[in-house]
Image: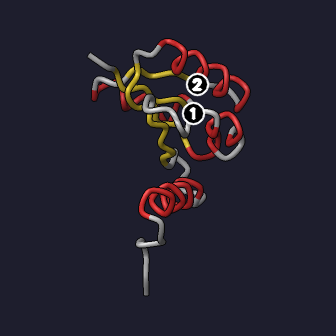
Amino acid sequence: MYKIGIIGDRDSVLGFMALGFSVFEAENSNAASEILHRLAKSEEYAIVFIIENYSCEIENDIQKYKDRPLPAIISIPGQKGSNGYGMTSMKKAVERAVGADILFKD
């Protein structure tokens, strides 16, 4: 069975332990990148959530896995709130899959 992991600062990720996630504390974006590569290489994780402030700093590392079926890498807001990166990356993924921007039309 595949696992779900989350990477981020301690305050943002600790609560996910209660949901059964594998929690990985990263002190900075370099540590987050190393953890991401380790999790992807293990092939044990179906989904890896990364706190937005780290996601935007390691975007090139995340892009290496975008064409792989696993893990799905998803950016989520941290304890300090959203910086918009997660929603922007989700819009790009949907546009790529569908061929048009179908989200947030006025």
| Residue depicted at x 48% and y 72% | 101
* Residue closer to the observer: 68 or 38: 68
Label at residue 92: none
Front one among 51 and 95: 95
The image shows residue 54 at horizontal and vertical percentages of 64, 39
Q: Tag 2, which secondary structure?
A: helix
Q: Position of residue 5 (x, y in %)?
A: 42, 26
On screen, 65 above or below 78?
A: above
Quadrant assignment for the C terminus: bottom left
Q: In this view, which residue lies farthest toward the front?
A: 99
Of tags 2 and 1, the one toward the viewer is 1
Question: Mark 2 and 1 residues: CB-CB less than 8 Å, in contact?
Answer: yes
Q: Which residue is mark 1?
A: 65
Task: Give the alpha-carbon distance from disc 2 to disc 1, as whole Å.
Answer: 10 Å
Q: Is residue 51 above or below residue 20?
A: below
* Mark positioned earlier in the residue sequence (2 or 1): 2
Element at badge 1?
Answer: loop
